[in-house]
Image: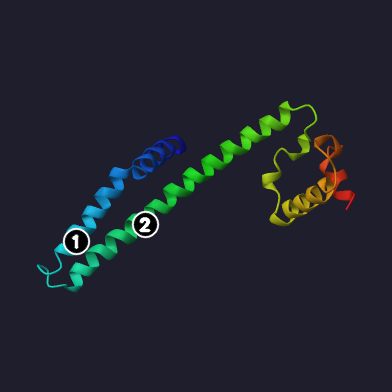
Amino acid sequence: MDSFFTKIASQSARIMGQPLAFIIATLFVVIWAASGPWMQYSDTWQLIINTATTVLTFLAVFLIQNSQNRDGAAMQAKLDEILRALDKARVEFVGIEHLTDQQIAEIRAALEKDIAGKAGKEGTTGKTVETLLDRY
């Protein structure tokens, strides 16, 4: 099921991001607006655009969120690999995206404080993230 949804979400996101998709959506809105006088600007006429845009927006939210989740996870995996591959990188940073917002803010503040006044990476590499946090 996950693979099937990923294929559909990826394909849909790719299609919806094309200029042609925007042109088609704009064309539908123009046709709808032009049909107003013919439908006497009735409640049904308004309901058509309201329903269509609500349903499409509702579905698009799930597709966009799925794409962002996959992109974010792929980016984290790439960054984790870079951390793992670099000799002086602190491998304890691998997986910190799973921490709470408060914990990440504390790490960022400690990093910014640690790097202040030091030249280059040599002055900022430490043993562990915990050591970094303990200093402040």
Residue picked out by circle 2: 57
Q: CA distance from mark 1 to mark 2?
A: 17 Å
| Label number found at residue 32 | 1
Residue 133 percent coordinates (x, y)? 85, 49
Image marks 1 and 2: residues in contact by CB distance under 8 Å: no
Q: Residue furthest left?
A: 38
Query: Amino acid type of disc 1?
Result: Trp
Residue 50 percent coordinates (x, y)? 28, 65
Q: Badge 1 local density, few (<14 within 10 Å), some, or many (20+)? A: some
Residue at (28%, 63%) from the top-left corner? 51
Instruction: Give 55 or 135, whichever is nearer the viewer.
Output: 135
Q: Quadrant of residue 48?
A: bottom left
Q: Earlier in the sequence, mark 1 or mark 2?
A: 1
Query: Amino acid type of disc 2?
Result: Thr
Number of labelled discs? 2
Residue 116 percent coordinates (x, y)? 83, 49
Instruction: Give 55 or 31, whichever is nearer the viewer.
Output: 31
